[in-house]
Image: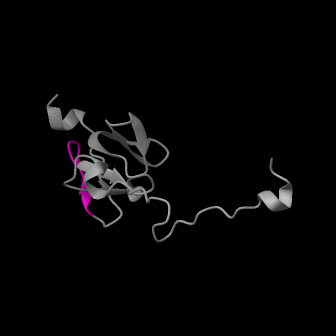
Amino acid sequence: MTETENETTVKATDINGSLIEIGSTVGYINTGTVGKVVDIKDDDGLWVLIDEKELYYKPELLEITETTTKKSKEKPAEKKKPGEEGTEAPEDISHITGGG
């Protein structure tokens, strides 16, 4: 038996219709999880196994990407100091509550 006779060809496409293959780098659109595809199976629907979390995902919720981590897509949030725009000092309510 040759290798091609023994393999079952399962084709999956991402949210944009691009073909997902084993070894492709994909991102899960709901959480930003990014990883390499290690398995594709047809078990009551198509499922794609990503190495990062070792979980199966529905291919239509994946997107092929060149990115290897979600860090490169996100900037860390900058903390604002009290008094800067967007922050307000708490109102002094000690006279109302009898703070003491």
| x 23%, y 48%: residue | 25
Along the viewing direction, whichever of 79 and 84 lies nearer the viewer: 84
Residue 4 on image: x %, y %: 17, 38
Residue 63 on image: x %, y %: 31, 58
Along the viewing direction, whichever of 89 and 25 lies nearer the viewer: 89
In the shown orientation, is residue 88 left or right of residue 3?
A: right
The image shows residue 85, relative to residue 48, as above or below, that is below
Along the viewing direction, whichever of 86 and 56 lies nearer the viewer: 86
**Residue range corresponding to the magenta coloring:** 18-24
| x 80%, y 47%: residue | 100
Q: Quadrant of the N terminus?
A: top left
Q: Residue furthest top?
A: 1
Q: Residue furthest bottom?
A: 85
In the shown orientation, is residue 40 left or right of residue 57?
A: left
In the shown orientation, is residue 91 left or right of residue 23?
A: right
| x 33%, y 59%: residue | 14
| x 81%, y 51%: residue | 99
Residue 16 on image: x %, y %: 31, 67
Residue 22 on image: x %, y %: 23, 43
- Main SS, magenta region, reads loop
In magenta segment, residue 45? no
